Each structure stands twice: as C-alpha cells, then as structure tokens.
Image (tube, rainbow, N blue to C red):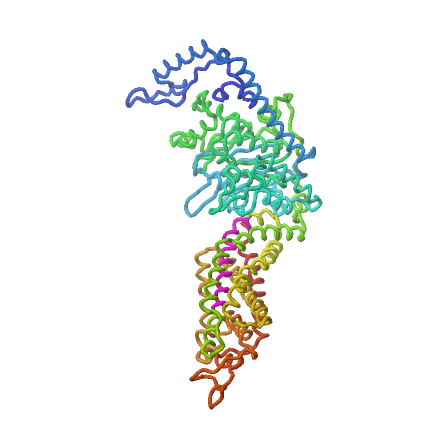
Amino acid sequence: VTHLLGHPERSDPANLWRPYNSKSHNVHAQLSFSTAPKKNRMPADADIEQGYNHPKDVELETKLSVASVANPINQHTSSNDTKANAAFRSELSERHKQISNTLQGLIGNKGIGSKKIKLEFSDIEVKIGPRKLLKGITASAHPGQVLSIMGPSGSGKTTLLNSLAGRIKTSNGKILLNGRPPVKAMKRYIAYVLQDEMFFGTMTVREVMYFTARIRLPESMKDEEKIGRADEIMTLLGIGKCCDSIVGTPFQRGISGGERKRLNIAVQLITWPSLILLDEPTSGLDSSTSLDLLLTLKELAKNGCTVITTIHQPSSAVFNLFDNLLVLADGHTFYYGNAEGVVERFNERGFLCPRTYNPGDFVLELAKSKAVTDAMFTANNATGGVIDPSVHARKPGQMDHTMTKKASLGSITEKTLSKGEEMKEVSISTDSADLQTDWNDSFASSWTTQFKALLTRAFIVKKHSAFDNVDMFQVVVIALIVGLVWFRQGNSEDAIQDRFGLVFFIGVFWAFFPMFQSIMTFPTERAILLRERAQGAYRLSAYYTSKVVAEIPLNVINPSLFILICYYMAGVNDDPRVFFSFWFTLILNVETSAALGMLISASQTNIKKALVAASILILFSMLIAGFYVNSDNIPTWLRWIEWLSYLKYTFGSLATQVFNPDLEFSCGSPSQYSVCQDGNNGPITGTDVLEVQGVANLPLVYPVVLMGIYAFARISTYFVLFYRYKPKVQ
C-alpha cells in the first residue's frame, strides 16, 4: 500500500497484498515535506521542486535503500508464508466476488431501474447570516461514477451534500437533475444517507429492514420477495449476524456504531436508488469493512446508479475506487477532477507527494495548509482551485477504460477488462415530458400495506413503554397505597367526602400519567418522521392512523391493572355494573389525556416547553373541575370557565356512577343533608350527595363530551403534523 502511488501496476487493488520486490523498484522516496536542518533555515524553491531532504534523512534513506536492495522482502519469505499470502489473497478475492455476485443476483441484468440521474451543480453558495459556508462550488456526477467529496473538517462537505439533497436552501447557484431543475417526483429515486441516522432503538435490525422493505418496495412484489431482498442486503453489508439485536437506546445497549452505520446504508439501498448521497459512510468502520462498502457502492454505480459521497481519511485502497474527486477548503473548490490524477496535477504546481504517502492524506494536508490555499486561490482566481480538464472530456454516464480497469470489482477479483470496456450503457433523458410525467410520483405501496407495516412498527415501539417494568411497578405501588389509605370505607356521612376525594384522585392521576407519556412522542420521532416523509416512504394519514390504533389497546393495560388492585380494596362501590362503567370512564379519560398530550407534543417540538404547556393544562383543569371549588361559589361572570376543563367531565362522570341512587349513607351528627334534619334519619342517597357537592347529575352527557374532546384532539393533531412536520426538501 505504501508504494501504491509510485507503481502503476500496484494500483490494481488485487495487487495491494502481493509481496513487494524491492529489486524491481527504487525504495528511495522523495519527500516534499521536511523540517529545516538548521534554525531559521528554510528550503529554497529549487529544493522544494526536487523534493528537499534533511542531510540526515538522505543518509538514513540511502542506508535503507541499500539494505532493501541487498535484502529484498521476498528473499526472506518462506514457502509457507507464500502459501499463506496466496490463501489470504484468494479469500479476499472470494469475498469481493461474493459482493459482486450478490448484487448482480439482487439487481439482475437490467441494472438499477429505468431512471438514470445526472446531477450537475454550479456556483453553489450557502450563507448563514454574514458567513459564507460555500463559495461557488461547481461539479457534476454521472450515472456509473463515484464522486467523492473530501476536505478538512469544517470545509463545507456536509453543507454541500445537504444542498444537493435539498435539505437546506442555497443563496446562489443552480442544481440540475438531467439538465433540468429538480421536480418533486424525483425524490423517490434519490437516497440520502446521513452521518448519524435515527432509528427506533427498541426495534431489532431485522424489524427495521423488514419494515423498510414492506413499505418502500413496490406493491407488485410479494412479501416473500421483499423479505428476501432485505435478508440479502443485510448479508451483503455484514449485519446479518446482528439482525436479532436491538438498535439500542441511551438506556439499552444495542448494536455497535459500525453496525449502526451499515444499517443506515442498508435501509437506503432497499429500493436501489438512482442517485445516492452518502455523508461520511465509512466513519466508524475499519479499513476492511470500509473497502467492502465502497466496493458495494462501486458495483451499484456500474449498474447505473449515481453515487456521491463525502469521506474522511480514506485508505489507499478506498481512494483507489473513486472516479472523480472534489476537494473543498474553507468552502472553496480546492480540486475537482479525476481522482487518480490529483497527485499529478499538484505535482505540476510544485507540490510533490512522497511515494510512501496516501494520496488522500496528501491532498487533505495541502487543503488544510493556509500557505498552500492562499497561494492556490490567489493563482487561480478564475477557477478557485485546481480543475482537472480531463473530467469534462468524458461522455456523461461513461467512464474511461483506465478508471474502469482501476476501480471495478473485476480487478479485485483478478478479471481482466479489455481496453475500452465500459459499464452498462446508460441513457439519460433530458426531455421535459420525461421529467414531469414519466417520473412516477405515486407511493410504492398502497395505503393498506403502509398501514399494516406502520401499525406493526408502532405496536413494537409502544409495547416497550406499555410493558415497562418501572412504570408497571409504579402503578402497582400507587394502587396499593391508594387501596390501603382508603381501605374499605364505610357508608357513614363522614366517609362521603373521603370517597369524593378518592374519585377525584383517580381521575387526576390517570390524566397526568398518560399525558406526560404522550408528550415525548413526536420530539423523539421527529427526525425519523421527517426523513421518511422526505423519501416519500408513506402517507402521513397511514402513519398517524396506525399510531393511534396501536396506542389505544396498549393504553388500557396500566389503568386496568390499577383499578383491579385498588377499586375493591378502597370499597368504591361494590356493584359490578358500577365497576365496569367506572373502568370504561377511566379508560376514556386516559385516551383523552393521551390525545391531548399528543396534540401538545406535535405543536411544540421543544420538550421543556411541551411539559410546561401540559402542566398548565392539567392544573387549570384540576382547579375548575368542581372538587376544590364548588361551582356555585365561583363568580357568576366567570362560572362558564368550568366547562373548559376536560377533567370536569371525567370527575362528573365518575362521581355520578359511584354516587348513584342505590348508594346510601347513614346520617351524621350534625348533618348538612336535609334528609337528616328536622327529625329525619335519612338515609342519604347518592343523588343527595351530588346535589350538595354541586355536581350536575348528567351521567350520559359527560362521556359524550369526553369523546368529543378526544375526537377534536386527534383530528387537530393530524393537521398540526401535516403543517409542522413537512419535510424540508427544496
């Protein structure tokens, strides 16, 4: 690898692991970077042009060169070592053949779809306030090619990729797809792989892949075929072994960072996109896995895909797979052209690359150097950097034979491509009719298919919170405490207020609990929802309906467990009919609170602000629900406000069910009830209690109003999602 640049025959990646024969090559390397041998002594221009060396470095290199020629590596290689190396190279070759064969088996002979995309962008500028992040970037990417975008940290790589993907607005410049401005329908043919994608952490890798396959692959494919493609892609990217592991959350350990990165790419490859944008896909991967990934992308390009990727510190073998290279420096174009010609172009300008230097590291060092960038941009004001003229000479969608020979999987597997061999013929249409009508803007799957897949996912995600051990423990403990504090209340007048307090506490507790759980719904799912909507994966109506349907039965579990424990312990009302009506009203209260919490969650993406809004709503509803203040004691001009409290309807419904005419209490002394005064001994009925407490006896009205509030919250949430969660795709 260290002699890759200096020896063309070693540019074949299959040759990178051959034993190096030092007799046939001069190992003496010219150094273009060297420290001065004496203080305040800088190398002269002539020294730089010839490759300046410290005298001691020259002496050391001479000794190393003589030693290397006298004792070549292969002279000390035993026959066993040679066999081991041959076995290693054979294993490597087989692995790369498997990548090629797997992709060919998945894609078939027709290549990736019928749509090919040529991306061109010119004079791209992006500003944030007064600061310019991109300063007139111009380049293009064709079907069949891999365009790599490199540059030091902060040079604008991700900003450029976001601009090309339509995620951020450009302040100047043009972006053309097949010679025309992008149209909405094209988004279904474009994939954008972010650096750190968001997934539902409680889902397994297999569940994520199967969901993506079912929802994004066409309806014409059978479910078995979709599952088969997902399995093949998992195997292709090396995540099959962790397919039953969860992705992971901050509180649960899941797959590794490298496996997560490959899963991120796998979900985008499901549909074989015509244009794929990748933001540093090899970050967090070892060099071998990175090479396999780039080989996969290269094979996709050979089948008609246009690949654009930002990359950070590629290995020599990975760098060798790039077709074109765009290097950024502080938002400027530092270099654009043929990747294998980058060293030659900078050599022509006096910047010599050491033979033992990775060309990717070499060009990054140059782009990071202030002295070099100042000199380059001053000398090339017209172009803003080094532009390789050969990059404009090739036909669109076609690679020259040297690049094909260099980077194809055929060379990895030691197949020889004849001179002039090209990738599969790629046709690019620039006809406006093709762009406007032939690009299919319909969803790949039907609403029913989307609903089923989204319902399964929503159930998987929700069940982990519904069956959370901590939450269930909390519910059981509080239910036991409630049952013990109000244990088997009597039927005396003194127990009436206690029973009222119990009913109110149960209603308030099961308003707080589900609402604050729902508050976390959309802020945590926002990134996933925006990404999937930007890709045109499914309809918002299918997503929202599935989420609501999945949550309804799971919201029933904890409150049902609570009531089963404390209801009879506290002796609320022993009539079985009252128990079931009480349970139904409580579930209705839970669903309404969850719906209101979801509405707040959709309206406010800031979790802290959402929690404040929910707290205000709950406390406001509590104060005017009729328990703390009798409605008759509220000023007449303000009395209407009590009907704005949804807890009033919950409390009223629960109270009218518990304090029904069949429930009787013995009179106290003294008594506030008329049936116990003037020599009367009662009994006090539930109807009498409601009258004294100022609770209107409307047992049928309260649940109907609650249902209306529930429906209003659900419908409003959908429209809030529709307008606030629109994907930011230009």
Q: Is residue 730 visible?
A: no
Residue 223 rendering spot, x and y as whole percentages? 68, 44
Q: Is residue 248 magenta?
A: no
Residue 200 rendering spot, x and y as whole percentages? 54, 48
- Along the line of sight, the residue nearer the viewer: 9 or 242: 242
Q: Is residue 511 magenta?
A: yes
Report the residue that reaches farthest toward the bottom.
678
Q: Which residues are the magenta region?
A: 505-530
- Along the line of sight, the residue nearer the viewer: 235 or 333: 235
Residue 374 rendering spot, x and y as whole percentages? 40, 32
Query: 298 above or below 588?
Result: above
- 94 sits left or right of 671 in the view: right
- Along the line of sight, the residue nearer the viewer: 292 or 666: 666
What secondary structure is the magenta-colored segment mainly? helix
Number of numbered discs overlaid on the protein picture: 0
Quadrant location of residue 698? Answer: bottom right
Q: Is residue 143 visible?
A: yes
Residue 256 rendering spot, x and y as whole percentages? 50, 39
Report the residue that reaches farthest toward the top.
70
- 553 sits left or right of 622 in the view: right
